[in-house]
């Protein structure tokens, strides 16, 4: 299982946009140097997050890194022009020598819809139509396409072409069965974000995806990534001291906008419990939680969202360092041991390694 990072590049009082951009690039360079496999940047159009143009940030990161794969998390495709999305990611792919990926989603924030002149009543229809066009652009240099929400294309040339053929497109979902089935039917990999509740309740979505994948007649194994909030420090106490208050501040700010009840210590402890989705603590504790995700979901990727709210940059960098130098090797060792332990069982009829 590949391990990587997600960030929304939060902005908070006392940190300028210029400083936050420098910090973002430093985080990405460190992740690359440590051998982490993916660095993903979110798209938002509000003053508490830095990045409204993921491809711009990813292009800068591409020029300063060597190996790490670079993705959006997510590209809010419903309010984007698929032609520009493809062209911009093609440039990131060229700059990075074939490391770009698109993680497309409908978005959990809605600011981009009025900003770009879209009607929220068309929320799902916009995404479905634009995803269709994006995939058509990915599959052919010349495209003829007709839809409802965008001007048609008649034998249009879309240039440049990326290094990768095809350019990877993942579908990001937060737990909507229809979105899961759509990803499977289209033969696209699934990124499942697990933010609240107990993470085992998300397993039916992974099962549904695999079932729909095979029913659609696709060959090969379906690809799943799991994204959760995470933080690592030398000890559990250190991690909570650095992370808990900023994390709760972010969740409560968003919660006030959406009418959620306030969260405090009890809610944080539930999220950080063995069944909760938050991977927090010492390197050993975080590794154990990630292994638990793997044993339940069998993903090919885990992406930890470490940089949240007003956590000081030095603490974020230390968390990334521990994630790369201690958590990742521990996860790899445990999973290798678990796989070896399952090998003798595979010879028995009816044994399912999943």
Image (cartoon, rainbow, N blue to C red):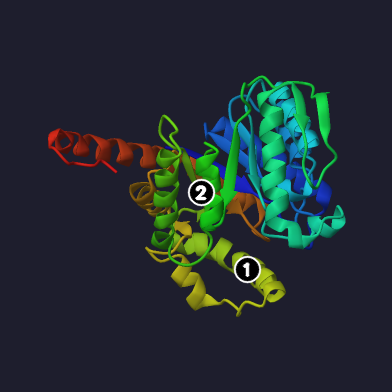
Q: Residue at horizontal 62%, vertical 27%?
A: 99
Q: Position of residue 67 (x, y in %)?
A: 58, 26
Which mark is on residue 181? 2
Q: Residue at horizontal 39%, vertical 50%?
A: 207
Question: Could you tell me if residue 321 is visible in this image?
Answer: no
First along the sequence among labels 1 and 2: 2
Q: Residue at horizontal 61%, vertical 39%?
A: 39
Left of 26 or right of it: where is 209? left
Left of 245 or right of it: where is 329? left
- In the depicted view, which residue is nearer to us: 63 or 56? 56
Q: Position of residue 47 (x, y in %)?
A: 81, 59
- In the depicted view, which residue is nearer to us: 194 or 28? 194
Q: Which residue is mark 1?
A: 251
Question: Could you tell me if residue 26 is visible in this image?
Answer: yes
User: Pointers 1 and 2 in contact (CB under 8 A)?
Assistant: no
The number of discs equals: 2
């Amino acid at each position: 299982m590949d391990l990587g990072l997600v960030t929304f590049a939060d902005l908070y009082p006392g940190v300028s946009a210029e400083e936050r951009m420098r910090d973002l690039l430093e985080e990405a360079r460190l992740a690359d140097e440590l051998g982490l496999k993916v660095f993903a940047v979110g798209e938002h159009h509000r003053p508490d997050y830095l990045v409204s143009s993921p491809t711009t940030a990813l292009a800068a990161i591409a020029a300063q890194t060597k190996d790490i794969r670079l993705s959006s998390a997510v590209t809010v495709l419903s309010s984007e022009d698929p032609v520009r999305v493809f062209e911009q990611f093609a440039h990131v792919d060229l700059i990075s020598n074939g490391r770009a990926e698109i993680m497309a989603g409908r978005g959990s924030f809605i600011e981009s819809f009025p900003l770009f002149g879209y009607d929220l009543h068309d929320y799902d229809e916009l995404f479905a139509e634009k995803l269709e066009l994006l995939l058509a652009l990915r599959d052919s240099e010349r495209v003829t396409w007709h839809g409802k929400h965008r001007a048609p294309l008649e034998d249009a040339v879309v240039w440049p072409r990326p290094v990768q053929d095809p350019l990877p497109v993942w579908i990001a979902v937060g737990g909507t069965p229809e979105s899961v089935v759509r990803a499977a039917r289209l033969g696209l990999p699934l990124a499942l974000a697990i933010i609240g509740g107990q993470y085992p309740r998300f397993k039916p979505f992974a099962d549904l995806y695999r079932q729909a994948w095979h029913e659609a007649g696709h060959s090969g194994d379906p690809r799943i990534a799991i994204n959760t909030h995470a933080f690592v420090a030398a000890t559990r106490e250190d991690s909570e001291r650095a992370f808990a208050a900023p994390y709760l501040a972010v969740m409560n700010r968003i919660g006030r906008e959406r009418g959620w009840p306030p969260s405090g210590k009890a809610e944080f402890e539930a999220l950080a419990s063995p069944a909760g989705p938050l991977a927090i603590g010492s390197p050993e504790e975080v590794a154990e939680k990630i292994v638990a995700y793997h044993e339940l979901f069998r993903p090919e990727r885990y992406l930890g969202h470490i940089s949240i709210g007003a956590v000081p940059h030095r603490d974020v960098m230390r968390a990334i360092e521990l994630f790369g130098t201690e958590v990742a090797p521990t996860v790899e060792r445990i999973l290798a041991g678990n796989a070896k332990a399952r090998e003798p069982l595979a010879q028995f009829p009816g044994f399912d390694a999943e």
